[in-house]
Image (cartoon, rainbow, N blue to C red):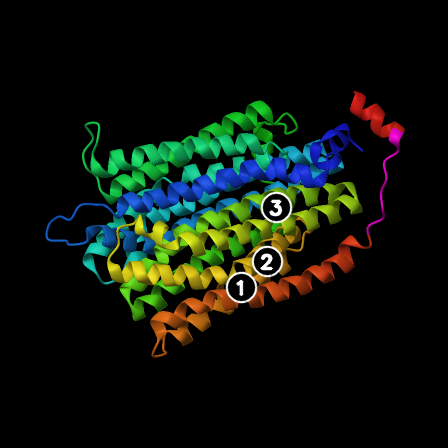
Amino acid sequence: MSKEAVTNKMGTGEVSKVMLSMGIPMILSMVLQACYNIVDSMFVARISDSEGVINAGEYAVNALTLAFPVQMLTVALGIGTGVGVNALLAKSLGQGNEEKVAKAAGNGISLAFIIYMVFLLFGLFGVKAYIGSQTKDEVIFGMGSAYLSICSVASFGIVMFSIYEKLLQATGKTVYSTVAQVAGAIVNIVLDPIMIFGYLGLPEMGIRGAAYATVIGQMVSMLVAMYFHYKKNVEVKSGRRYLKLEKRIVKEIYMIGFPAIIMQALMSFMTYGINLIFGAVSQAAVTAYGIFYKIQQFVFFAGFGLRDAVTPIVSFNYGMGDKKRVKQGVFFGILYIEIIMLAGIIALELFAGSLIGLFAMSEETEGLCIMATKIIASGFLFAGGSIAIQGVFQALGCGLESLFVSLLRLCIVVLPLAWMFARLENAIYMIWWAFPIAELVAFAIAVLFMLRANKRIIKPMKERELQESFKENILLV
C-alpha cells in the first residue's frame, strides 16, 4: 500500500467530516454556478424593446431556453468524461498506482480537446437548423441562433474546465476547484450588464453580450483550474507522453464516464423534448419552464456538489478495500443530500413568488412559473435520493444502474407523461405533475438497485483494519 493511500484524507479522516470538508466548497461552487446562470437570465429578461419588438426580454429568455439543451450537452460530455477520469484517478491513487494516475489525467485532457472540436463544428454549421426545429418565431430564432453560435464556437473553456475541475476533486483538493469556479462566475456576473447593456464605453450587444460574458467566464475558470492542477496536484505526474490516448485507459474512463455522459445528456434531451411538448400548449409554458429550471438549479446543483464528494470518497476507499468506510460514505452521502433537498423544498415553497418576480415576466408567465415551482418541488426528496445513490453507483463501477435511473427520471417516465398530460383539457396545470411522478418511480428503482449493489459488491468486501503501528509509522513520515 502506498504512502499516499494511507495519508490522503479520503482514506484516513472521519468520513462524515471529510465529506463535508470536500463537499461544502463544491456545493458553494455549484450554487454560485446556478447563481450566475440565473443572473444571466435576469439581465437578459431586461433587454430593451427595439425595432417593433415588444417584450423583447421575454423573447430573449425563451431563446435561452431553446439554446439550453445544447449547452447542457456540452457540459454532459465534459463532465461525464471528467467523472470517468475522477473515479479512475481516485481509485488508482487508493491503489498507489502513480503511472495509471498520470495516464488517467493526460488522456482526460486529450479527450476534452476532441469534444471541443465537435462543438466547434456544430457552432459553425448546425446552430440554425437546431433552433429552427423548435420555433418558427423569427425574433426567437434570431436571438437563439446568435447566442448559441457564440457559446458553441467558444466552448473550449467549459469543456476543459470540466476535466481540470474533476482532476482537482479526485485528489481531494476541492477548495481549488471551487476557487476556479468562483473566479469564472464573478467574471461572468460582472461582464453581463456591461456587455448586454453597453456600459463602460462598450456597445450594447443584447443577447450576444450575454453569450460573450458566459464564454469569457468559462475561460477564466479553465485557466485558474489549470494553474492549480499543475501547481498543487503533486500526486499527478504531468508530461506530453501522458496525453497520448491509450485504448485501455480510455476504455476504463468511459466504462464509468459513458453512463455519466448519457445521464447528463438525458437532461439535454429531456429539455429539448419538454420545449417541444410545452410549446404545443403555450409559449408562455416554455418560458416558465426555462425560468423554473434556472431557479431549481440552486437546489439540484447543491446536491450535485455534495454528490461529487461522495463519488471520490467511496471510490478511494473501495480501491483501498475498506468496507467500513465505503458503507459510511454511502450513508452520509444519502443523508446530506436529502437534507439539502429538504431545505430546497422549504425555500421554494416559501419564496417562489419573490424569486420569480425578479425576472419581470408577464403576469401569465409568472403565474405559470409559480405553479410549476410548487408542484415540481414536491418531488425533490425522491430526486435527492436518486442523485445520492447514482454517485455511489459511479464510485462502485455500476454505470448501467446509474444510467437506467437517469433514463427513468429524465426520459422513460417524464416525457410520455408530459405528452399525455399536454392533451388533457387542463393541460396547463397537469403537465407539471410529470416531473414529481417520474422522480418517485426512479427513486424506487434506485433503492432496489442499491440493495442489490450492497449485496453483490459491498457485503463481500472483507473487513479491513490497518495495523496501528504501520499506520502510525506512515503518518509520522
Q: Earlier in the sequence, mark 1 or mark 2?
A: 2
**Residue 110 seen by the camera:** no
- In the orientation shown, which residue stands out farthest toward the bottom? 425
Q: Earlier in the sequence, mark 3 or mark 2?
A: 3
Please tell me whether mark 3 or mark 1 is closer to you in this view. Answer: 1
**Residue 434 seen by the camera:** yes
User: At label 2, which amino acid type do we have?
Assistant: Ser
Say above or below: 93 vs 321: above
- Residue at label 2? 386
- Residue at label 3? 253
Q: Determine which quarter of the picture holds residue 134.
A: bottom left
Magenta span: helix, strand or loop, mainly?
loop
Q: Please tell me whether mark 2 sits on a helix, a strand or a loop.
A: helix
Q: Residues within 10 Å of mark 3 (few under 14, many from 20)?
A: many
**Which quadrant would the C terminus be assigned to in this image?**
top right
As rendered, which of 14 and 246 lies closer to the eye? Answer: 14
Tell me which residue sits at (43%, 44%) in the image: 34
Residue 248 location, x and y as percent? 65, 45
Magenta stretch: give its range.
Answer: 461-468
- Residue at label 1? 439
As rendered, which of 69 and 250 lies closer to the eye? Answer: 69
Q: Do the residues bearing badges 1 and 2 touch, measured as CB atoms within 8 Å?
A: yes
User: At label 3, which amino acid type do we have?
Assistant: Ile
Q: Residues within 10 Å of mark 2 (few under 14, many from 20)?
A: many
